[in-house]
Amino acid sequence: MLGLLALAASAWGETADPVAAEGAIDPSLPPPERARALGTLAFRLVELAGSAKAHATGFRIDVAHYRESLRDLVKENDARPEAERLPRPLVLDLVRMAALLQSAAECQTGRYIVCPPDLMTRLRRQRTLLEQGLAPLPGGR
């Protein structure tokens, strides 16, 4: 009986494995470093979406974390003087990635995220654009 309760408490044995928990984005980081951290999270989420092994619950948690962290970054970025702001194309790429990741979060087959090929193509293309936008930031590759 105790085993059944434990199984039920763990959402029928599903382990969420949130990616964001291992790499939480520190809101005290300067905007370029936070943008880079968001990019890293987005890159991992794109890979998870393509793996068809991402648990839907954990993936959705990570996408929500990305979206909320991005919202905070955009609000702070808008409050900064023009010379200290992140480049507008980079911010737009981060926002586009949030929309695509949200679409991926809705691609649930059973307990897993399984995205159609056209969405995966768009996610990978956006990941490339994001990598290109992050490269010129301080500390870039």
Image (cartoon, rainbow, N blue to C red):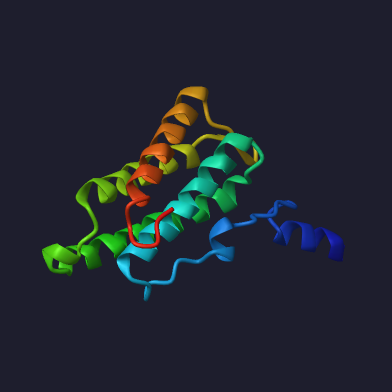
- Residue 122 in view (yes/no): yes
- Residue 109 in view (yes/no): no
**Residue sitting farthest toward the left:** 82
Q: Nearer the viewer, residue 44 or 139?
A: 139
Question: Is 69 on the left or on the right of 61, as rendered?
Answer: left
| Image quadrant in which the N terminus is located | bottom right
**Rendering quarter of residue 119:** top left
| Residue at screen point 25% across, 60% down | 74
Q: Is residue 29 above or below residue 50?
A: below
**Rendering quarter of residue 16:** bottom right
Question: Is 43 on the left or on the right of 114, as rendered?
Answer: left
Q: How many marks?
A: 0
How far across and how far down the image is residue 59, in percent? 55, 49
How far across and how far down the image is residue 141, in percent? 44, 53
How far across and how far down the image is residue 34, in percent? 38, 64
**Residue sitting farthest toward the top:** 118
**Residue sitting farthest toward the bottom:** 28
How far across and how far down the image is residue 97, in percent? 37, 43
**Rendering quarter of residue 32:** bottom left
| Residue at screen point 82% across, 58% down | 4
| Residue at screen point 65% across, 41% down | 111
| Residue at screen point 44% across, 60% down | 37
Q: Nearer the viewer, residue 92 or 84?
A: 84
Question: Is 82 on the left or on the right of 38, as rendered?
Answer: left
